[in-house]
Image (tube, helix red, strand yellow):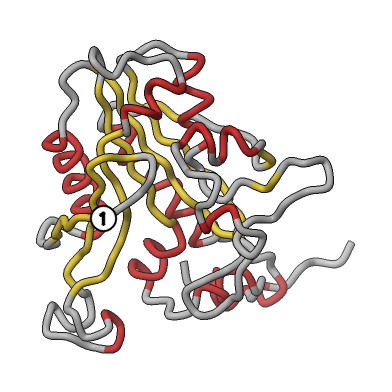
Amino acid sequence: MAIMSDTEKIQPGHLHPITQTIEDVVRVFTELGFSIATGTEMEDEYHNFDALNIPKDHPARDAQDTFWLKNGKLMRTHTSPVQIHYMKSHKPPFQIVAPGKVFRHEATDRTHEVQFHQIEGLAVGKDVSMANLKYYLDTFLKRIFGQDLETQFRPGFFPFVEPGVEIDVKCFRCKGDGCPTCSHSGWIEILGAGMVHPSVLENVGINPNEFSGFAFGLGIERIAMLRYGVDDVRLFYTGDLRLTNQF
């Protein structure tokens, strides 16, 4: 039997940076007391849009954003349907994170792909407040990017939360001075969040006068790009081992 030389030895494999990022994000939230929930990538219109308070005429329903299937269903455009399924089958209090792949029918460029990964977060209970949301997200971002990270919360609109916020982090490259990476603003948008809209709670049979909740959604590719200094999201999907072997 031929003996394999040192130069021919099989090299150990590497986790893909997207997989690493998902595992790291989920680990932080499970350490904070969140459970993991999953859902199907093929969804119906009710769970993907209607139950989330997204109006019939919302641009996200347009064919240019959604992959509609011949059976009348669609490929989910976000991981938010997981929270609808979960709330319909569980009684509060609970707090979950739902990682998964999502699909958008849009042109690709250095920051957009037709498929990517999100993690949805949800907490529902009595007296859940925006202060709770801020604590969890600040804690998460500092554990992922470092304790010296600066964040800012600013108003944002999402149909399924009220009020809604967008969370930015101080630009890693220019440290807030302004550069092309942050569009010269000094800040990089990292995720969206807010307090669960009362209509969403009513849609799943939870009394909004008794319970409140917060929800957030973050893009895994955006987190990975910032952590690893990758400047084009399409590089994650080329299958080029020169990328994955770095991690």
Seen as rendered, the residue at the extreme right is 1
- Report the side of 157 relative to 129 (left or right): right
Q: How crowded is mark 1: few (under 14 residues within 10 Å), some or many (20 or more)?
A: some
110 or 6: nearer the viewer: 110
- Identified at 24% across, 46% down, the residue is 140
Task: Please report the residue visible at 43 percent of the width from the left and 54 percent of the height from the top.
Answer: 21
> What's the amino acid at mark 1?
Gly
- Residue 172 falls in which quadrant of the image? bottom left
Q: Nearer the viewer, residue 75 or 46?
A: 46
Please tell me which residue is depicted at 11% across the width and 62% down the height of the picture: 150
Q: Name the residue beneath numbered marker 1.
A: 156
Q: Residue at x 14, y 59 (%)?
A: 152
Whether residue 109 is visible to the viewer of this picture, yes or no, is: yes
Tally of numbered tags? 1
Task: Tell me residue 223's x, y (percent).
Answer: 37, 61
- Frontmost residue, 242 versus 201: 201
Compared to 95, does 24 lie above or below? below
Q: Position of residue 25 (x, y in %)?
A: 37, 47
Q: Is residue 12 visible?
A: no
Q: Where is residue 204 in the image (x, y as percent from the top left)?
A: 46, 20
Determine the secondary structure under disc 1: strand
Q: Is residue 222 above or below residue 107?
A: above
Name the image quarter holding residue 202. top left
Q: Residue furthest front?
A: 57
Residue 180: x %, y % from top left: 29, 88
- Give the position of the N terminus as an image quadrant: bottom right
Picture layout, residue 51 above or below residue 231: above
